[in-house]
Image (tube, rainbow, N blue to C red):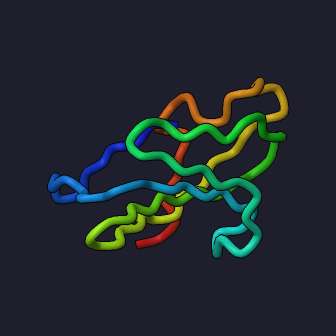
Amino acid sequence: MNWSRTFSDGKAVQAESYSAEIATDPDMMHMIRQSKSLAGPFNFGEMRPGRYFIRVAAKGPTLARSKTYRFEIPVDWGTTAIDVPSALKGMGP
């Protein structure tokens, strides 16, 4: 999964590293995958069909965390979860 390293106002995120978490619930209480990266894409490996929730956090001088997004992997999708950014659905404000 690739992502933009900017805030919604376009300013760059000053981070030493990034982490992404995938859970089976929107409150992120039942995490099933976590991936860390210095700057490149995240790799979560193969995932089963189902509904999932994801968020990204930046570690650095200021901790920044994205909103939680929902995505679904259909039964016949294959082995890649997020090829198209429009697959992510925002979860609230």
With respect to residue 21, does 74 lie above or below? above
12 lies left or right of 65: left
9 lies left or right of 45: left
Residue 85 locus on image (x, y percent): 47, 37
93 lies left or right of 32: left
**In front here: 62 or 77?**
62
Location of the C terminus (image quadrant) = bottom left
With respect to residue 72, does 78 lie above or below? above
Which quadrant of the figure has residue 63?
Answer: bottom left
Residue 17 locus on image (x, y percent): 40, 54
Residue drawn at 41 percent across, 67 percent down: 65
Residue 91 locus on image (x, y percent): 52, 65
With respect to residue 74, does 13 lie above or below? below
Residue 35 locus on image (x, y percent): 60, 50
**In front here: 71 or 35?**
35
78 lies left or right of 57: right
Residue drawn at 71 percent across, 54 percent down: 33
**In front here: 44 or 69?**
44
